[in-house]
Amino acid sequence: MKDLVRSVLVLLVCFTPLASLAEGLEDPRQSPHIGVRERANYVDPQAYYWEGFELKNEGDCTAAVERLRPLAMNGRGYEAAQHALGLCLMSLGGLPAEKGASFNGSNLTGSENFIRGRTWVLRAANAGDFQAQRTLLALYAVNLGPDDNPVELGKWLQLYAVNPIRLTLGVLEENDGLRQFLKESISKRDLLIGREQARNWTPTFWAPPGVVQ
């Protein structure tokens, strides 16, 4: 009988920590200071992702590019980073961030940073990012688009107008007259052909060299 009692006591001693953990209680064998240190040293895995965007919004595009480029290079699913990277590179290339600010178009089109930035914006726009599509329209409006094709402009006007993500989120259109200005800058024929191309359009996702999607 004594042996049986001793066996039961041994089992209780051995399994009490497990029972405590199962019930959500602290493990009596673990120092509470360990948990404090773990919380103090915790690093949000998303912090690095957002840091690039925060730096961009603060106007520090040089630092933002260093953090956004690795994200953008991931390809599909990182269109927001691609767009932000594109904006920063174009800014470093001389494109002013302030609306209405003057700039030299010839200097911009000769800037490697600007060309690379516009390429990233186009990649994000081709993937369906509505913000990148609007940036593309803004570039067309100042004759800095990726081409001089009015039909292509008509296509992007339609794609932005019917972008499902933009409509689902209920994003309000900026009251700056951009789309109306662009519509009036091309012929009705080019606009209609562009709309037809938009109906047959499917998103394409840029992938890093050597990656097949």
Image: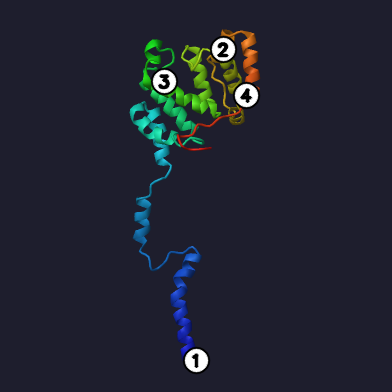
Whole-angstrom CA distance, mark 3 to mark 4, is: 27 Å
Residue 140, labelled with which disc? none
Whole-angstrom CA distance, mark 2 to mark 3, is: 20 Å
Q: Residue placed at 49% from the left, 62% from the top?
A: 24
Q: Residues within 10 Å of mark 2 (few under 14, many from 20)?
A: many
- What type is the residue that disc 1 sits on? Met
Residue 115, labelled with which disc? 3
Q: Nearer the viewer, mark 3 or mark 1?
A: 3
Q: Nearer the viewer, mark 1 or mark 4?
A: 4
Residue holding disc 4: 162
- What type is the residue that disc 3 sits on? Ile
- What type is the residue that disc 2 sits on? Pro
Mark 2 or 3 closer to N-term? 3
Mark 2 or 4 closer to N-term? 2
Residue holding disc 1: 1
Residue holding disc 2: 150
Under tag 3, what secondary structure? helix
